[in-house]
Amino acid sequence: MRGGRIAVVGGSIAGCATALAATRAGADEVVVYERAAGGLRDRGLGLAVHDERYAELEAAGYVDAAMPWVRLTRRSWLTRDGGGRSGRRLGQVPFPFRSYNWGSLWRELRARIPASVDYRQGAAVERVLPEPDGAVLHTADGRAERFDLVVGADGYRSVVRAVTRAATVPAYAGYLAWRGTVPAGALPGPPTAWPEDEAATVTFPGGHMIAYRIPGPGSTGTCANWVFYAPPPPSSAFVPRDPTSLPPGTVTDELVAHHTAVVEEHFPPYWRELVARTPRSQATVQPLYDLAVPHYGEGRLVLAGDAAAVARPHTGSGAVKALQDATVLERCLRRAGTWDEAVAAYDAERSPGGRAMVALARRLGRAQVQATPDWAAMDQEALERWWRDAADGERGFGGRALTPS
Ligand SMILES: Cc1cc2nc3c(=O)[nH]c(=O)nc-3n(C[C@H](O)[C@H](O)[C@H](O)COP(=O)(O)OP(=O)(O)OC[C@H]3O[C@@H](n4cnc5c(N)ncnc54)[C@H](O)[C@@H]3O)c2cc1C
């Protein structure tokens, strides 16, 4: 399916990757509409990509070794009770991941989009009108444009998804992810206290925190990235039915106080200090959602990334899933003889995987946050058994394998 006009709504990870897919597949014109007026490059914290998924995406040409990353090999599980400064080690499991700084990954993807793509910033799509042979996009500045195909890469509150028959809405999972970064120079101990290739999990009843190194901002050195999962305080003003993320600098005193109290009560000294050294301006809070659409494609609309499926971050697959969507979209556009064939092939290939990742994320959330085990009673053997069950035999942890082309 060569030629034609393709619009991509959203210019984040899925948006940049699908714009690349559309140009590689031979679209005549590709327009990206990104609501944010400023660059996204300085926002975001860490994310991880499984080695096997990286290899597939590298072969497909969506990531490469020049994108700054840090090697992770194992994930340790720690508890405060009976431990020293860093806590008592319950055990460890393999963790073959590359970690990235979200901002630098976005910047590298953005830089790979050819200049022929019209990437518009500050361009919010307000309405999408599907037509039998295309779709019309209406933007906030009153303009309307028609396209042969529209890619909804506009995240978990997608306006493109809203006009499909599968107008599924995300469901709040009942707990939050507090996130932050600490510069390597501000770590509370010598580098040997926490090896660079180790992702550390600090456990407590009702949640956990995972911490790992990522490339520093602007690709200088490394910094420590942590994500702390727990419910908000029971009487929280922040527990509305439909909470949105709190970007850096806007996390409320109530949520900071709750987080600090849990850390003070349950964390070994090293990890308590790590969290305390996080500049408040760097901390964010993200409510977690589950969302899986029955179909990734309908008429001349396709969904990609979080617009199609939101899996809680425990699966380590958010960015991978978005990049895989782009890879498959390119393949389907190249092979199909008509737009309808391309949309149907993409839908058939991506929909089951999206649903499976969301199911796995729910399972991991239950095991690690909503129904935590008696962590302190675990040893290496018990931890391995529990992890195999929690991660459903690790099928899909870090993202499902791409079907060979
Ligand atoms: C600024 C930012 C920082 C992030 N940081 C991290 C991180 O540190 N770690 C992590 O694991 N994940 C992070 N994420 C989420 C991560 O990018 C996604 O979970 C995953 O990579 C899939 O991305 P996506 O492109 O599908 O969705 P998103 O990254 O959510 O991108 C959706 C994009 O669509 C744009 N958009 C939404 N509605 C409209 C509209 N109506 N018109 C035009 N544009 C619209 C948004 O501005 C946004 O740029 C971040 C997302 C953003 C936007």
Image (cartoon, rainbow, N blue to C red):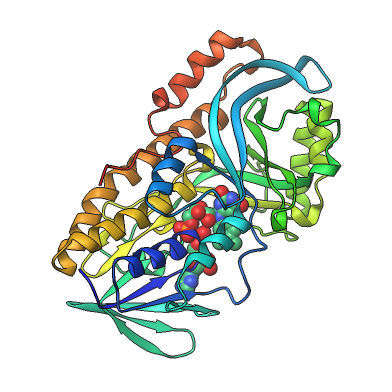
Q: Is residue 264 visible?
A: no
- Horizontal and vertical percent position of residue 358: 40, 42
Position of residue 255 in the picture relative to residue 386 (left or right): right
Q: Is residue 78 visible?
A: yes
Q: Residue at x 40, y 22 (%)?
A: 393
- Horizontal and vertical percent position of residue 97: 54, 36
- Quarter placement of the N terminus: bottom left
- Horizontal and vertical percent position of residue 138: 39, 84
Q: Residue at x 40, y 25 (%)?
A: 392
Where is residue 167, by image quadrant? bottom left
Position of residue 157 in the picture relative to residue 134 (left or right): right
Along the line of sight, the residue nearer the viewer: 218 or 211: 218
Position of residue 270 in the picture relative to residue 206 (left or right): right
Q: Residue at x 42, y 27 (%)?
A: 394
Along the line of sight, the residue nearer the viewer: 335 or 329: 335
Q: Residue at x 67, y 59 (%)?
A: 247
Along the line of sight, the residue nearer the viewer: 330 or 378: 330
- Horizontal and vertical percent position of residue 243: 57, 56
Position of residue 234 in the picture relative to residue 119 (left or right): right
